[in-house]
Amino acid sequence: MIDTLLADTEAFAAARLARPDDDPAQTLARVSWGVIAEPGDGVAGALIARLGAVDALRVALDDSRFALSDRVIGEAQRRWRPRARQRDVVRSLQGAHEVGARLLLPGDPEWPESIDDLGEHAPVLLWVRGDVGRLSMTERVSIVGARAASAYGESVASEFAGDLAASGTLVVSGGAYGIDGAAHRAALGVGGGTVAFLAGGVDRAYPAGHQQLFERIRSTGAMVSELPCGAAPTKWRFLARNRLIAALGMATVVVEAGWRSGSLNTAGHAAALGRPLGAVPGPVTSAASAGCHRLLREYDARCVTSTEEVRELLGIDATRAGGGGAARVDPDQTRLIDAMSTRTPRSAAELARIAGLSEDRVRALLGLLSLEERVRGDEAGWRLRTE
C-alpha cells in the first residue's frame, strides 16, 4: 500500500502539503495507520515501535513479509486489511487540509510527550485544529464528569477550571455536555487554555449542540483527535479517547460521575499511568456523585474540595499560582454570603430573591460553602456559621 501511495501523484501531493519538510513515505504510512487501525490498537503500536511506521505497514498488508502462523499478528492483519483503501488515506489528508487541521507526529516539537506514557497504546498521530502550542503547556489538568450534571457539579467544574486556567494551567476535557462543557467554558471565559479530545474527526462537531463551544475552543485552544476527518464517534472510540485525556493531564479530577460513568474509565487510565487522581464529593443521596464516592472508597482517589487542593495534586506552588495564595473571589458567592444571616435561616428561594441569583445557582453555591463549612443548613433553612 505504501508503495502505491507514493506512486500516486494525488497522495504524494497531499502528503507534501500536510508536511512539506518530511519524508512523504513516513507521512503516508502514519496516516494509513490512522485509517486502518482503531485508536489504542496495541498490536499496531508494538509493530510500529519494532519496525517503524513504513515497514510495519508493509508487514500489516503483505502476507509475504510476516509469518501468518503468529496468531496475534494474523488476527490483526485480518482486521486491518479490509480498511486498507488508498482513497481513504488521500481523503484523510485532503479533509484535514480543507478544515485547517494540522497533522502532528511523534517527535514533532509540539507533540505532547506525556502521551507517550501510553506505550504501545499511544496514538500513531494526532489531528489538531486550533493552537497546537496549547498541547505543550507546562501545567495541565484533566477535568471530567457526568454529561447529565447537576447545577452543583457544573458550578464546581467552572470554579476549578476558571481558577486554574486564569493562573496558566491548561484545562483538558472531552467536549461533552455537562462537566466537560462547563470546564471548557470556564477556561475560555478567563482567557485561559483548553483542549478538547474528540471521539470522532476534528471536522465533526459532536455533540452538535456544542458547535459554538467548539468554534470558541478552535479560536484560542485546540480540538484534537487521532481519528481521520469524517470519522464518526462510537462508544468504543469515546472510551479510547479517555486514555488521551488522562495521559495529557498531570492529574485528573472527576467532578461528578454515576456508578458506571465513562468518567471512571478516564480515572482508571489516570491511575494506570500513575497520574494523581482527585474526586469531588457530593451529597450521599446524589446518584450523580456515586461514582466519585466509589473512586474515593475503592480507588484511593484524593478528596478534592477546592482549587488549592487541585493545585496540590498537580504539585503547583499556591503562592506562585495564585499571586501570594489569594483565591479568586466568585462575585456570586459574595452576593450570596451578603444575603445570609448568622441567626435567621433562609430558604434557597428566599436567598435567590435577596441576592438576585437563580435558585439553581444558589443551591450550587450553598453546596460549595457547605463543603467549606462556611454555612449550615437544616429544615428551617440556611445560615452562616459563626464558629
Image: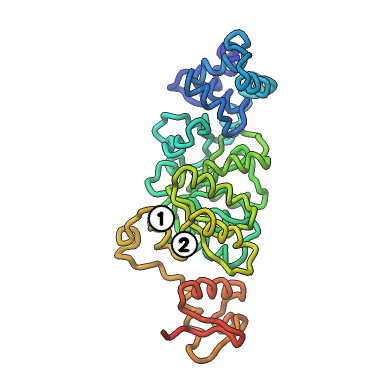
What separation in Å lies between label 1 and label 2 (alpha carbons)?
Answer: 9 Å
| Residue ID at (50%, 49%) | 172
Q: For label 2, count other residues whose C-alpha is less than 10 Å away and answer few (under 14), some (14-19) or many (20+).
A: many
Q: Amino acid at mark 2?
A: Val
Outermost residue to the front:
298
The one nearer the camera, 348 or 76, is 76
Provide residue 58's location: percent of width, then percent of height: 57, 14
Q: Quadrant of the C terminus?
A: bottom left
- What secondary structure is found at the residue carrying circle 2? loop
Q: For label 1, count other residues whose C-alpha is less than 10 Å away and answer few (under 14), some (14-19) or many (20+).
A: many
Provide residue 149's location: percent of width, then percent of height: 62, 61
| Residue ID at (57%, 58%) | 294
Say which residue label 1 marks: 313
- What secondary structure is found at the residue carrying circle 1? helix
The one nearer the camera, 377 or 161, is 377
Q: Amino acid at mark 1?
A: Leu
Up-down: is 329 above or below 209? below
Up-down: is 206 above or below 364? above
Up-down: is 201 above or below 220? above
Up-down: is 272 above or below 289? above
- Locate residue 353: give its quadrant: bottom right
Provide residue 122's location: percent of width, then percent of height: 51, 33
**Residue 304 has which mark?**
2
The reply to whether residue 33 is visible in this rendering is yes
